[in-house]
Image: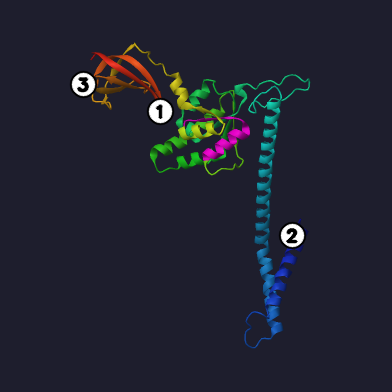
């Protein structure tokens, strides 16, 4: 390798010297110096410049070549993964009519391909689910077994939150990194970082693309990502939907106690909240601001932002 570097340096220096030699006639000449002397001077300067710049030029060539090779390998690997996924999807739809997500494969014995279990599908965390913090509690309960991926571009976005000038955002971002470290220690979960590049302008686009490549499920609490990924055929597990599903709600006709803390949209309405944050709109409750009253549940409404309970006043309890 040292001999190759030596001769490469010599060739580079001679190349610069020849350039200087032929440019000697075209460049301005000092008074009293012949053309031959100018050419020799410029040739020597070219040789010196070749010796000085070879190290930088060679380093740039090696760096550029390495970068191009890495990009080529990454693109080829993703193309192979995409083609293989499409092939398995077509195969699974041919054998037994199962969907492409199942990726069924015939065994050597020619038996009917088995359907993959839901828990075997990889999970992909987005920034909102990590910052939210509830994902750690869910993981500790054992409801998230298997492979969990954290994309590198999500970590980049999380790092930007952790470096925010806003104190609350900065605290949440730093807490997010702690959550990732704690999830790595939970039995039954294998958490890995996806460090390959993905096509897409935004983080949401890249998450959707990764969901398609891995045939995985995105865990998020972001409403927009939930809708866009679902429209693109990627399964989404929304933490807010999970929280709403786990809330214990009263049934119509049941009486509950609620403290009225503000006025509602209608003139006679009062608004209170259950301990889990569920809003309760009480007809005839506007007169009992800052008082606890007993109400009867009339109906429960499911809205995009959560559940709302509508009730009517029964009596004042305190």
Residue with the mark numbered 3: 287
Q: Quadrant of residue 312?
A: top left
Q: Quadrant of residue 132?
A: top left
Residue with the mark numbered 1: 305
Query: Picture coordinates of residue 253 (x, y %)?
Result: 34, 11
Q: Which element type, helix, strand or loop, lies under badge 1?
A: loop
How was the colour assigned to the protein in this rendering?
Answer: rainbow
How would you rate the neighbour count of disc 1 (Cα within 10 Å): few for under 14, some for 14-19, many for 20 or more?
few
124 left or right of 166 in image: right
Query: Picture coordinates of residue 252 (x, y %)?
Result: 36, 13
In which quadrant is the C terminus drawn? top left
How would you rate the neighbour count of disc 2 (Cα within 10 Å): few for under 14, some for 14-19, many for 20 or more?
few
Q: Quadrant of residue 188?
A: top right
Q: Which element type, helix, strand or loop, lies under badge 2?
A: helix
Q: Nearer the viewer, mark 2 or mark 3?
A: 3
Query: Picture coordinates of residue 148 (x, y %)?
Result: 58, 29
Query: Picture coordinates of residue 289 (x, y %)?
Result: 23, 23
Residue 178 in view (yes/no):
no
Q: Which residues are magenta?
A: 203-221
Query: Within the magenta stretch, is there residue 199?
Result: no
* Picture disc at residue 231: none
**C-alpha span from label 2 to label 1:** 67 Å
233 left or right of 283 in image: right
Of the numbered discs 2 and 3, the one sitting upstream in the chain is: 2
The relative height of residue 60 versus residue 312 in the rendered view (above or below) is below
Task: Please report the residue visible at 69 percent of the width from the left and 43 percent of the height from the top.
Answer: 76
Of the numbered discs 2 and 1, the one sitting upstream in the chain is: 2
Query: Within the magenta stretch, is there residue 215?
Result: yes
**C-alpha span from label 2 to label 3:** 90 Å
């Amino acid at each position: 390798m040292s001999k190759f570097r030596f001769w490469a340096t010599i060739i580079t220096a001679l190349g610069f010297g020849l350039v200087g030699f032929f440019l000697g006639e075209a460049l301005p000449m000092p008074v009293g110096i012949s053309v031959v002397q100018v050419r020799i001077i410029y040739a020597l300067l070219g040789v010196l410049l070749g010796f000085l710049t070879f190290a930088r030029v060679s380093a740039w060539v090696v760096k550029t070549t390495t970068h191009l090779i890495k990009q080529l390998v990454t693109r080829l690997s993703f193309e192979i993964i995409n083609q293989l996924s499409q092939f398995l999807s077509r195969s699974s739809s041919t054998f037994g009519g199962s969907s492409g997500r199942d990726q069924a494969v015939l065994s050597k014995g020619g038996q009917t391909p088995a359907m993959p279990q839901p828990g075997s599908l990889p999970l992909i965390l987005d920034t909102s689910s990590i910052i939210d913090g509830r994902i750690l509690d869910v993981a500790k309960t054992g409801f998230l077994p298997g492979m969990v991926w954290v994309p590198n571009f999500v970590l980049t976005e999380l790092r930007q939150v952790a470096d925010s000038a806003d104190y609350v955002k900065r605290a949440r971002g730093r807490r997010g990194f702690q959550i990732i470290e704690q999830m790595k220690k939970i039995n039954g979960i294998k958490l890995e970082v996806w460090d390959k590049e993905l096509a897409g302008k935004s983080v949401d686009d890249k998450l959707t693309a990764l969901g398609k490549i891995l045939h995985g499920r995105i865990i998020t609490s972001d409403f927009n990502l939930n809708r866009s990924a679902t429209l693109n055929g990627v399964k989404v597990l929304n933490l807010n939907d999970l929280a709403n599903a786990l809330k214990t709600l009263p049934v119509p006709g049941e009486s509950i106690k609620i403290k009225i803390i503000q006025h509602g949209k209608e003139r006679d309405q009062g608004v209170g909240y259950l301990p889990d944050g569920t809003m309760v709109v009480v007809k005839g409750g506007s007169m009992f601001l800052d008082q606890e009253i007993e109400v009867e549940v009339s109906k429960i409404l499911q809205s995009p932002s959560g559940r709302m309970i509508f009730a009517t006043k029964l009596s004042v309890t305190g």
